[in-house]
Amino acid sequence: MKILILEDDRVASDYLAKGLRERGYVVDQIEDGLEGLVRARHEPYDVLIVDRMLPSLDGLAVIEALRSAGQHTPVLIVSALGSVDERVRGLRAGGDDYLVKPYAFSELLARLEVLARRRSTAPVETELRVGDLALDLLTREVTRAGTEIPLQAREFQLLEYLMQHANQVVTRTMLLESVWDYHFDPQTNVIDVHISRLRKKIDKDFEYPLIHTVRGAGYMIREGT
């Protein structure tokens, strides 16, 4: 399970992240509300743990923005604001559960497991499509217009990420972090090399390109020119 913690108290965030990682979860930590919103909109998470009081954008505003964008990742709100009115506000903003600080880690863990189970009952998408391009997440087969396209492991990861964000600009930073797991700029042309290879396989022998460069911003996969 992959979890995003939005918490500006670094001590509390580190304690929580340590406990979750010890149980085998993948955990990202962000202290700023606006930065957290961007990450939550562009990265796939199983559950979000969101503090009410965050710099730049408070927790409820983050949740409301995600729900307005059609994103339904389960959200556990954690807050020192424990009155009935505050809990109701949190749930009405789009939170799925509300835990008052201070809390027992075992209770938080149990609530996360419940939220994850709820999500696991939803239909799982096993195929991505953009125009005549199809990517099967189970068989790892890629075809375009019925023609099978063999890809290396990194090329498959890159294409999968682009297709998960079809019709959206994907920045170099997003690709470095999500496809290469780099949280720094390696000062190499690794992305350009792999995009070039992918274009030769995905676009070269077909009627129109799907992978586009967005000058000064990054890349986008979309149908049409």
Image (cartoon, rainbow, N blue to C red):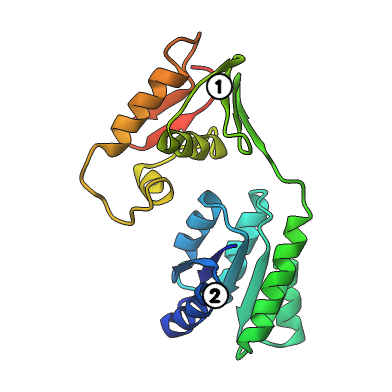
| Residue at the disc numbered 1 | 223
Report the number of numbered marks.
Answer: 2
Residue 199's spot in the image, x, y percent?
A: 40, 22
Which residue is depicted at the point 36% across and 38% down?
Answer: 217
Question: Which quadrant holds residue 211?
Answer: top left
Position of residue 39 relative to residue 129, above or below, is below
Q: Which mark is residue 11?
A: none
Residue 170 in sight: yes
Q: Do the residues bearing badges 2 and 1 touch, measured as CB atoms within 8 Å?
A: no
Left or right of residue 71: residue 216:
left
Left or right of residue 217: residue 90:
right
Q: Residues within 10 Å of mark 2 (few under 14, many from 20)?
A: some
| Foreground pick, 88 / 224 | 224
Position of residue 124 relative to residue 184, above or below, is above
Residue 90 in sight: no
Q: Considering only order in the chain, which callout, 1 or 2, is on the residue closer to the N terminus?
A: 2
Query: What amino acid is found at the position of numbered circle 2 in the picture?
Result: Leu
Which residue is depicted at the point 67% across and 55% down?
Answer: 67
Q: From mark 2 to mark 1, how far is it between C-alphas?
A: 40 Å
For label 2, the SS is helix
| Residue at the disc numbered 2 | 20
Q: Residues within 10 Å of mark 1 (few under 14, many from 20)?
A: some
| Foreground pick, 211 / 59 | 211
Which residue is depicted at the point 42% across and 25% down?
Answer: 212
Residue 125's spot in the image, x, y percent?
A: 69, 41
